[in-house]
Image: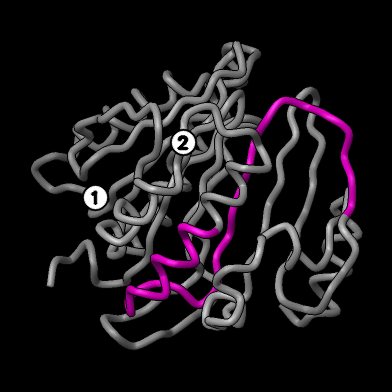
């Protein structure tokens, strides 16, 4: 088994029309032993950009702290947020610098550029970049993700359609990969519009809607029950979201009451 697969996990990014989504599972394991079901693999670099990491958990945590420092320094020096393309080059050069003793991670940078066009860039463990106009996947369920995304993805997906496609893809792939799963997180970033809330229909998932400047970020937390219930395979993601809230304090109140 490759050391990249030791802790398991998957990351998927998908592009739409003036929107981009990135998702990961929540499992942290040691080979086939599941240790935790709430291990974050996504880091929000700016209001419009995310980095997803698959690979060795210790290196994931190291790089998240390293990039948090570099991104904050960039913001202080330049007095603006780092663009996705610039961030991708930063990640690539950081990995290539350690090519002889590499970090065992495979990152994906996903976000919206200054024109709100989607940007997706995948990399290997030494920083070799691959620009994707459609979708990019990495992790132990990479083969399953690519196979599922091929029929699900279409050009110019609307934000709601993109949210549906990437959620169904991560659900289906983790059901077929024993090294990932146990819940998922989906972040959908798009141009701003009117925020709204869904009516709850049962404690299965949790949707958080955040409004940051002119950007809207939707974060969907899929519980393990949702990923393992085969009867929900053909049900619309929009119909099984249980809670949509507009403010962070409401979100944390709901999380506390759910015991997350």
Question: Where the C terminus falls, by quadrant?
Answer: bottom right
Q: Which residue is mark 1?
A: 103
Q: Which callout, 2 or 1, points at the residue further toward the start of the chain?
A: 1
x%, y% of residue 127?
Answer: 23, 34
Name the residue rendered at 72%, 25% in the picture. 191
- Specify whether 158 is left or right of 198: left
Secondary structure category for the residue under label 2 = loop
> Which residues are drawn in magenta?
168-197
Q: Which residue is mark 2?
A: 154
| Res. 250 image quadrant | bottom right
Name the residue rendered at 59%, 53% in the picture. 186
User: Which colour scheme appears in the figure?
Assistant: one colour
Name the residue rendered at 79%, 43% in the picture. 210
Name the residue rendered at 31%, 26% in the picture. 131
x%, y% of residue 215?
Answer: 74, 28
Q: For marks 2 and 1, give the CA distance.
A: 33 Å
């Amino acid at each position: 088994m490759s050391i990249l697969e030791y802790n398991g996990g998957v990351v998927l990014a998908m592009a739409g029309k003036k929107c981009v989504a990135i998702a990961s599972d929540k499992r942290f394991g040691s080979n086939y032993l599941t240790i935790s079901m709430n291990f974050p693999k996504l880091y929000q670099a700016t209001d419009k950009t995310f980095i997803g990491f698959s690979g060795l958990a210790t290196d994931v945590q190291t790089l998240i702290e390293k990039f948090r420092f570099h991104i904050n320094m960039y913001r202080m020096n330049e007095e603006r947020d780092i663009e996705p393309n610039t961030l991708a080059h930063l990640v690539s050069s950081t990995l290539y610098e350690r090519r002889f003793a590499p970090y065992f991670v495979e990152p994906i940078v996903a976000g919206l550029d200054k024109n709100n066009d989607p940007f997706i860039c995948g990399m290997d463990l030494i920083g070799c970049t691959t620009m994707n106009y459609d979708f990019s996947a990495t992790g132990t369920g990479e083969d399953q993700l690519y196979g599922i995304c091929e029929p699900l993805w279409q050009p110019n997906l609307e934000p709601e359609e993109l949210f549906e496609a990437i959620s169904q893809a991560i659900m289906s792939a983790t059901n077929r990969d024993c090294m990932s799963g146990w819940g998922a997180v989906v972040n959908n970033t798009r141009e701003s519009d009117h925020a709204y809330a869904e009516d709850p229909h049962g404690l299965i998932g949790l949707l958080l809607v955040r409004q940051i400047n002119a950007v809207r970020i939707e974060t969907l937390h899929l519980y393990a029950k949702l990923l393992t219930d085969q009867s929900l395979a053909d049900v619309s993601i929009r119909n099984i979201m249980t809670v949509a809230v507009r403010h962070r304090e409401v979100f944390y109140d709901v999380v506390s009451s759910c015991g997350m």
